[in-house]
Image (tube, helix red, strand yellow):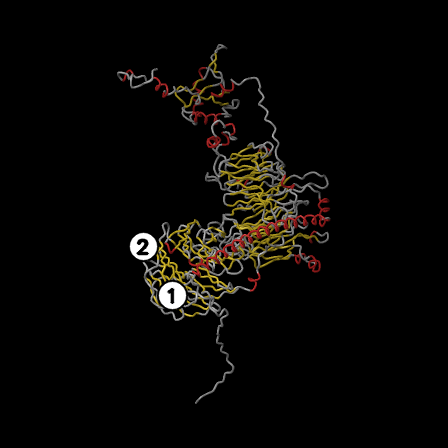
Amino acid sequence: MVALSIDNLPASEEELDFSDLERRFAIPEQEETLENVIFVDNLPLVEEEKEAKLISYIMKTLVKFGKVKENGIHMPKDDSTGKVMSKGYMFIEYATAEQAQAAIRGLNGWKFDKSHILLANRFMDVEKYSEVDDVYRAPPMEAYVEREHLRSWLADDCGRDQFAMYAGQDLTVFWNEPELPAEVVHTRTNWTETHVQWSPLGSYMCTFHRQGLALWGGHSWKKLMRFVHQGVRVADFSPSERYLVTWASEPISLDAVNQYLGEGNEHQNPYTADDEGHTTCVWDAYTGSLLRSFPPIKAEDGKAAKASWSQFKWSPSERYLARMTPESSLAIYDVQTMGLVDKKAMKVPGIQDFAWCPHTIIDPRTNVAKPEMIAYWTPEEGNLPARVSLISVPSKTLVRTKNLFNVFTCALHWHPQGQMLCVRVQRYTKSRKSQYTNLEIFRTNERDVPVDVVELKDSAVIFEWEPVSENYRFAIVHSDDPNPPPMNASRMATATVKTSVSFYAFERQGKLVQKEGFKLLKTLGGKNTTNLKWSPQGRHIVLATLRTISACPLEFCDVDFDQSAAAKSGDAGDAITVLEAREHYGVTDLDWDPTGRFVVSSASSWRHTMENGYVLWDFKGQQLNKASVDRFKQLVWRPRPRSLLTEEQKREVRKNLKDYSKEFDEQDERKIHAADAELMSYRRRRISEWVAWREQIEAKLQAETEEALSNGYKLPAMSDNEDFVVDELVEEVIEEKEEIIN
Amino acid sequence: MRPLLLQGHERPLTQIKYNRDGDLLMTVSKDKVANLWYSHNGEHIGCYIGHLGALWTIDCNKTSTLVITGAADNTARLWHAETGRMLHTWDLPTAVKRVEFSHDDQYVLMVTEERMGHKSGIYVFAIDISRPEQSNEPVVILRASGAKPTVAAWSFLDKFIVSGHEDGTLSLYDWRNEEVVQTAKAHEGIITDMQMWKDGTYFITSSRDMTARLFETATLEAMKEYKTDAPLNTATMTPTQDLVILGGGQAASEVTTTSSRQGKFESRFFHKIFEDEVGRSRGHFGPINTLAVQPDGKGFASGGEDGLVRVHHFDPEYFKFKYDY
């Protein structure tokens, strides 16, 4: 075509050649789509006469899913045998593809009658799968990429611990330095969008984003894995970090995920149509694959129940994942297959809460791991008492139950080593006017599971087992008022509550069963403690008043301090001593390092904006370091994996501790010296700079002053009496006499 | 260090100053009264009464014979220090925010507010010490080209006048020739206070941008920076010990229901050379508006939005304190 120009304009409009435009903007002819056609198989074979009857019968079901097009049913027939018979399948054309989709979901597996279970498929799929090549082509092997050592941080020369701090938009991993400012390991801005979390053994750092979560670790802090889960809020790792459960407040939407991944990346989408609308996902942390997703638990009114993530709990061996549907059932999944154990969930009407025994116990005689255990409780219902039950998994046999009366609520506290379970039972008095607490302690490791009861006069609000100890010590915070204090908008308590802290221990005197049980060691009264934090190594505990506007005490306690006093009086309670009472203004969180040597108390800007930052204490309560950090949000210690040393080896280390510590002390000393020297030389430099500048300025001023004075400038004279005398009249009464004058 | 509490004002303090000898303390507040106190025991000597509006500023000459005050009633007044007799009134177009005697006591500078169509300016008047009446004709009026000046001070030998402005800039004027010699961007926010070292060779500024800085007068070169977490109203330097004291806190209008701790109403001590915070002094329950150090370095006074003046005399430990280097 000749290009249009001013010289060869066509004579009339008809002569204009629009063909290029027509080609460009032509509407492609609507392709006949068969997305709305489904294919139903396994129908009964019928004669021609009965065809209408069958169709009209099946039609009743078909219209439930949508509108079937007129003449939209086609049933092929066969007359090869002489008799016209249907072939047992039919094609159904719906008005839209969505209706067809719904019909497939509804019809597939539908029991038409006793011997006919229908199979429904998309018509397009029949074509698609018949075109699949019969020759198997192996997918290309992906090159092996070596992973970095995920535990390299444990090989630090000084055995230091790491922590992650989130402040402002920056997430930073530090080495903890007790005597010096913490040393930065790695830092990034906008590394996480909401908060940061470590996996339970410290291998991964988990960051949360709008589109999902990411795991980081290794020496170079590379991204190790990402999990697409939009709006993710919470992640819960299995105890050995192999799996994780994530929960988002919004339902999964396939389209939204595809949109995020971008065109051409749909194969990266972990979800299928079955996952649509679900909120909880179970992942393999190592491969990043989705194992299963779960829909939100629906409350009776059809709305999603709140916080459904806490209803998932991992067994300590991470072989099982239990999921509670409040008030109705407990489902236990085998993680290998993600199928239900015994193919069905346990019906537990009224179930309120459950907890796995946190530790797999090895039977010392047979050296075989004992079956895992779950404890759960159900409230009073009509004439039935409230009940705490222990079942073993996977057999689901009942190990022990106990009936309880006048129960307001229960809380389950397993001892971290799994040998004891304390059920903190909040009970009504007979008049139902007030409440008090019973501690029902199940010795789950012993035959027949004996139960010890500790009756309190008031209400225990906090219960904490000492993590490591031989006599199962625990501490409670108890108070006359079981209700939490009033809180402001950012959940800081606006008033204190009078509380006491008590310590108990299990005692066995002689061999008599009557003489064993839990005994009160000591009560520390007149406190307003809200939280108890045991050292992960036991023995030391911090009594803290957290998230309270008007009070901020931290008390560092040693429960084995005064051994000699305890031995003298024969009362273990006398050993309990408050080593230091400290304060950290505005404290919101308290966290022990994994070795139990340090405690960090922090004031987070999530709660308030006063003096945000953290303080590092040693276990005795000596302040080592204080950092005020603008817009400080969170500080979390990197957990350590379980020790690989045997008990004997540990004992050996403890015995030779002095030799080891000498070495480390020297190291510390050198480091402090080096840092001191550096600081000193820095300061000296600044001082000498300042002095040099002053000398120069003063010399200049001197010259200028002389010049100015010679030009008639006059400075007022200093007052001559440098030391001035201040007269003060002091009157003193020497004598007082009273005279009566007539 | 138990402070003396001077309860002579009913409204927020605006400025406090020691005389050169350090035996007297002058305080002004928004309640129209200027007070004079003995600094060593806090005994009240008397008031300078006559202003009709809130007082913003006060200064006295080196020999402590004359006192000048500036107020929101658009006047600056000269007083006989000892008797409290009013000697002279300067009528200015707007409120007087800052007055200061020159080092040779021959001049006084006045910073006026920008209001009601009147440009702000720095007025310099000559002072004739021999008679009460003073000339109403300023020697010069310095007009800023940019944002209005908020504070000003005399340089060494009264060669220059340095002014701090609302937008955080500093200007160095050769005031006799009405010429700007140097400008510098000092702060991100309004400059709230400026105090000269005794010889006028460097000075400290404070700003609402939560920092205080040290500048060399002749070059306006920034030398040190002191960072805090609260907006600052005032900054001063101690003559011995190499410390600076900063005061401020959340503006009263921004404080809702806060404890005094939350408002950060503390005097903060920083090391002048290392820029490290070394201590704090609590007590006020409102923002600190003004700080002054006794010229011999033995104490300091703070005036707050709460209407109180706290006069501190340092403990012996303070003088033993020595930074390691």
Residue at 40% over, 22% down: A69
Name the foreground residue: B308 vs A720.
A720
Q: Position of residue A17 (x, y in %)?
A: 32, 16
Q: Nearer the viewer, mark 2 or mark 1?
A: 2
- Give the SS element for disc 1: loop
Q: Residue at 55% x, 62% y: name it.
A: B318
For the C terminus of chain B, give its image quadrant: bottom right
Q: In the displayed structure, would residue A278 be above or below residue A184?
A: above
Residue hosting label 1: B33
Q: Amino acid at mark 1?
A: Val
User: Which residue ends up furthest to the left in the rendered image?
Assistant: A12
* Residue B112 on image: x %, y %: 36, 57
Q: How many labels, in total?
A: 2
Q: Are marks 2 and 1 in contact (CB under 8 Å)?
A: no
Q: Position of residue A40 (x, y in %)?
A: 48, 21
Residue projecting furthest to the front: A710
First in sequence: mark 2 vs mark 1 = 1
Give the label on residue B118, or none: 2
Please tell me in which quadrant of the rendered image residue B98 appears: bottom left
Q: Nearer the viewer, residue B96 or A473?
A: B96
Quick one: label 2, few (<14), some, or many (20+) residues within 10 Å? few
Residue A536 position, x and y percent, is 63, 48
On the question of residue A406 being in view, the answer is: no
In the depicted structure, whether residue A340 falls above or below residue A467: above
Q: Residue B7: name its quadrant.
A: bottom left
What kind of residue is marked 2?
His
User: Which subunit holds the residue at mark 1?
Assistant: B
Q: Chain of mark 2?
A: B
**Image height check: is A206 above or below A115?**
below
Q: CA distance from mark 2 to mark 1?
A: 26 Å
Residue occupying the point 37% across, 20% down: A24
